[in-house]
Amino acid sequence: MIDFAKVNTRHLEAFREIIGAAHVIVEAESLDNYAHDETEDLHYLPEVVLKPDTTEQLSRIMRLCQQEGLPVTPRGGGTGLSGGALPQWGGVLISMERFNRILDLDERNLQVTTEPGVITEVLQDAVKEKGLFYPPDPSSRGSCFIGGNIAENSGGPKAVKYGVVKDYVLNLEMVLPSGDVIWTGANVLKNATGYNLTQLVVGSEGTLGIVTKIVLRLIPLPKFNLLMLVPFRSAENACAAVSAIFRAGFTPSAMEFMERDALDWVSKYVDSSTVKIEDDVQAHLLIEVDGNYPDVLMQEMEGIAGVVTEFDCGEILFAEDHQQKEELWKLRRRVAEAVKANSVYKEEDTVVPRAELPVLLKGVKDIGRKYGFHSVCYGHAGDGNLHVNIIRGELTEEQWNGTLKEGIREIFLLVKQLGGTISGEHGIGLVQKSYMDVIFDNTSMQLMRQIKQVFDPSNILNRGKIFD
Amino acid sequence: MIDFAKVNTRHLEAFREIIGAAHVIVEAESLDNYAHDETEDLHYLPEVVLKPDTTEQLSRIMRLCQQEGLPVTPRGGGTGLSGGALPQWGGVLISMERFNRILDLDERNLQVTTEPGVITEVLQDAVKEKGLFYPPDPSSRGSCFIGGNIAENSGGPKAVKYGVVKDYVLNLEMVLPSGDVIWTGANVLKNATGYNLTQLVVGSEGTLGIVTKIVLRLIPLPKFNLLMLVPFRSAENACAAVSAIFRAGFTPSAMEFMERDALDWVSKYVDSSTVKIEDDVQAHLLIEVDGNYPDVLMQEMEGIAGVVTEFDCGEILFAEDHQQKEELWKLRRRVAEAVKANSVYKEEDTVVPRAELPVLLKGVKDIGRKYGFHSVCYGHAGDGNLHVNIIRGELTEEQWNGTLKEGIREIFLLVKQLGGTISGEHGIGLVQKSYMDVIFDNTSMQLMRQIKQVFDPSNILNRGKIFD
């Protein structure tokens, strides 16, 4: 039994005193905006939404909530896919939307210091103007916050060449549940100074503290890129081509897989006529290379085209210009929306060593047949990251919320057996926590629970996310 | 007061039963080999050295040591520079030298699974034969163990383009102090599944558990490289050129700085005549670019040469062939030995954002003048990682072991002020722990201590390293 306190008028007065009445939200219709994210159909209403905009305000809020035993849920852009930002216990929801300043774009050191409420694309555009590049770009980059990306260790299409969020985070300012404020590291590219608290916090889904400042490393912006869309007559062949490309020595800057349904649905959804899909096509790879030397990129595209030809592909579409590239990327980026618009679905975020993708895909389909569900798969194939969208279709309520769980568990057991894990970039949050035992034994889970306890002894911060 | 038990005959019998008598070492002269590493002149004798070669043996040993309250110190190749592998409390030293098998070189997935006692260079050569690349290469790569590299989060010259050890570790098998065995993650390139135990263990200096299997990601081996040595008339100008090269959009695969004394001493030490140093030269940069397209590399070298010319450099030496490249790299790699042969010294492992290097170098020299010490500086300038070798010279015992500590603290305070930290790649171990307060406040140190307690509640494993 959870023994959290309820938010009362005394608490509200204290919050108003700390951040001003305009930033203490209690109106029901406003609260409802913070009751869901992009995860299926979960809904939890907070008792109050607070919008601090300084570390010191947040520290005072946290101290008060800890003293009073109020549950606290931090929230970024609300685009999460695992329910990590949902206020399961009601209580206090901290919206980080006013922490929206880019504090220091340090061109001398190729670093940027930012607040967590900055929208990812805004940050990317700001550094791009200086010829710099912050690669991690989840599909939601136009609305997600950089802070949320850090909480979930987000990836996106560029991860295959440039790595994920954790590979760019140098240092974090964080408010602990006690209200104490720490910096986790230093603004340096290499660090062997004590435990890596920075990397412990990245991907911890807002359960250890609330990040208030972020130092990211940047890299020079590649000047050119080329893009091609390759159709395959077999989805497994498309997956097999992925690792062959890497084994041939190429490192594309994006390597996206889409099953036929995914591209069909999204083409209708965004009303695009760029892509004509032949009847015998079962899947596509969208492949990008980037760099500073156009001749080299042409050579690489030709080399990659040579590899995919060995996997029974159809006619390759080379994007002709910027506009066509944008069109192809729009199709890829909006697949999730299109699937969502088409049907109720559950999205799994499987990831395996990339050469095991064909086995995973075949396994997903076999398991689907066994449990009677259809799935639409797509994702960041270069990373072995396959998003499995299980379509509700004709499933009964009992199948959908009952036996399907066993089907998902079978998929995850296969993932584990292939050396993979149950989330590549979406996080565990609320929706995957009952499957954590597939990946981690009791000993590892106990270590994680005890680490949580070190940071949050009262267990008030985002309790019940990742594990119970 | 530390209340560790002493190793007795009953313990020795149990150890012999677990790993065989040949692998339980108690002879004084053999023990002495394990009493020091490459850190200055520290010396701690273990009571017994154990050489297990399976995870199960190590698990039984750990369980016994925990039950009996025996201190345990894990040791790799013994090349550490911060005393992390020294058995400060005597007790049991675990040598990982028999964990020396490369278990699986997975070319399909560009991954390798290895035991920790494999010598770094052996691993690098094995993957190179398959056209693959494991970049982190500390100067000691010919004798250090990959397990030690993980304990210290090692770097080396390639880090500037390819990152450090932490950027290659995907998954670790580890024996906890309780004897329990866990895997920290999964064999995948992206992972958002619970707390990042893998990254918590990397760089934890053998204080949280003993790693027994390591899964590393690999990348395609770049086919070509070019190397140049650039002399500068001012060391601060050399440092300033470093960040200018990156700001011009270049990412060299190595960018090493050496003060005049360093190159002078090592040239004599290895009896090399490759480099003629003009009288007015104060420092050098050794700059490498690598990739698959020779024309591009030539363009990049020319571009970099154009940048350094603006910093009052002398005549650039372009390495003509493989042999001359080897010669230049030998000079760089053996600087530390040469300095050691020349004088008693203490090595500091400072790291700052790279554009702050000139300020750091000037500060080190100013502080040296204040405290009366000479220093020889060199290091991985592209990472902002400057090794400061403080030369004993004419310092009295009281200065060397007394007031010098204040001088070092001043250097570290400057490092902190510049956004840096006190160790980039050597670790904290025994020799830097009294300076941890420069970087971390009490709250952060308490978090680290409590994390240690989660993994090692009896505090038997490498106790007293990183912090007391």
Image: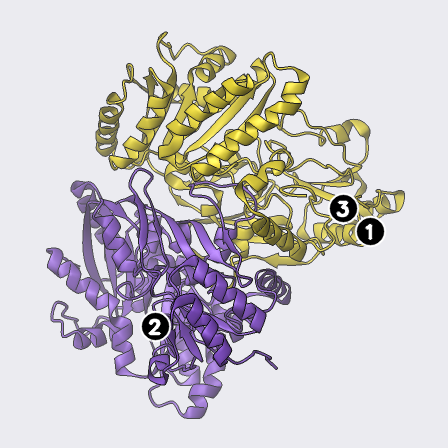
Chain colours: A yellow, B purple
Question: How far from the left and from the top, in percent, is residue B167?
Answer: 40, 50
Coordinates of residue A387 in the picture (x, y in percent): 49, 28
C-alpha distance separating marks 2 and 3: 69 Å
Chain letter of disc 3 in the image: A
Label 1 near label 2: C-beta < 8 Å? no
> What's the CA distance linking mark 2 and mark 1?
61 Å
Judge left or right: residue B298 versus residue B262.
left
Residue linked to disc 1 = A68
Q: Given the image, what chain letter belongs to the residue carrying mark 1?
A: A
> Which class describes the residues within 10 Å of circle 3: few (<14), some (14-19), or many (20+)?
some
Camera-near label (3 vs 1) is 1
Quick check: do tags 2 and 1 share a chain?
no
Percent position (x, y) of residue A108? 41, 52
Q: Is residue A135 above or below residue B146?
A: above
Return the residue found at the far right.
Answer: A9
Image quarter in which the N terminus of chain A is found = top right
Q: Which mark is residue B22?
A: 2
Which quarter of the image is occupied by the C terminus of chain A? top right
Q: Are marks 3 and 1 on the same chain?
A: yes
Q: Which residue is mark 3?
A: A19
> In the picture shown, does residue B126 fall above or below B324?
above
**At 34% from the left edge and 37% from the top edge, which residue is drawn?**
A222
Residue B300 or A199: which is nearer the viewer?
Answer: A199
- Secondary structure beneath disc 1? helix
